[in-house]
């Protein structure tokens, strides 16, 4: 299932913006952080990679990593966008006090899959590049601004990963 090309500069539809508002709500965040990341990969595969694109929502795909400590295969559904040929992932964890589990997996084992495509992950550490990518991320999902503010208030810097095609 090839990834949908997610251009941050693309104009967003009314349905997309409505889905984004729901995703930023208490109910939407609760679903995403508690259930969605586990259920959505199955729905994604059952629809041939068309979900959640077909309902006008932000593009997501299953990220497959190797567990940092266990060495086992791990899968989680994540939002993404493109910066040229590279895919960008934001490890926001809803602005929480900890990095998501997949962050530690990519740090330990940078070889991964998103959708059914293979990538090598690298954390973006250059401040100017991070600022530029957060600007693009905010165009794809405005909730990232809130997440950055929330994380900064507790002293956490949200990591960004660049996935380079293999």
Image: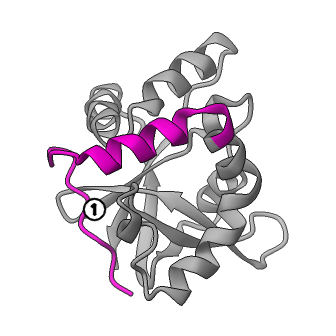
Q: Residues within 10 Å of mark 1 (few under 14, many from 20)?
A: some
Residue segment shown in magenta: 1-27
| 102 left or right of 86 in image | right
| Magenta stretch contains residue 122 | no
State which quadrant residue 137 falls in: top left
**How many numbered circles does the render carry?**
1
| 133 left or right of 151 in image | left
Which quadrant, please, contains the C terminus? Answer: bottom left
Q: Residue furthest top?
A: 153
Q: Residue at x 53, y 34 (%)?
A: 24
Which quadrant, please, contains the N terminus? Answer: bottom left
Q: In the displayed structure, would residue 49 be above or below residue 8?
A: below
Q: In the displayed structure, would residue 64 be above or below residue 157?
A: below
Q: Residue at x 44, y 47 (%)?
A: 19
| 109 left or right of 111 in image | right
| Magenta stretch contains residue 8 | yes
Tell me where residue 16 appears, x and y as whole percent.
Answer: 33, 49
Q: In the displayed structure, would residue 28 be above or below residue 164?
A: above
Give SS at disc 1.
strand
| 161 left or right of 137 in image | right
Q: In the displayed structure, would residue 1 be above or below residue 159?
A: below
Question: How is the rendered protein coloured?
Answer: one colour
| Label 1 sits on residue | 86
Q: Residue at x 15, y 44 (%)?
A: 9
Tell me where residue 84 appears, x and y as whole percent.
Answer: 17, 58
């Amino acid at each position: 299932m090839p990834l949908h090309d997610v251009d941050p500069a693309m104009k967003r539809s009314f349905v997309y913006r409505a889905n984004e508002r729901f995703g930023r709500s208490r109910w939407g965040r609760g679903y995403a952080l508690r259930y969605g990341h586990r259920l959505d990969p199955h729905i994604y595969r059952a629809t041939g990679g068309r979900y959640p694109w077909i309902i006008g929502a932000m593009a997501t795909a299953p990220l497959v990593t190797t567990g940092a400590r266990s060495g086992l295969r791990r899968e989680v559904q994540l939002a993404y966008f493109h910066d040229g040929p590279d895919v960008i992932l934001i490890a926001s964890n809803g602005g929480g006090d900890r990095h998501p589990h997949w962050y530690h997996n990519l740090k330990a084992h940078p070889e991964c899959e998103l959708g059914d495509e293979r990538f090598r992950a690298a954390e973006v550490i250059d401040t100017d590049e991070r600022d530029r990518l957060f600007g693009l991320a905010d165009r794809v999902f405005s909730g990232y601004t809130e997440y950055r503010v929330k994380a900064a208030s507790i002293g956490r810097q949200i990591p960004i990963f660049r996935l380079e095609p293999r």
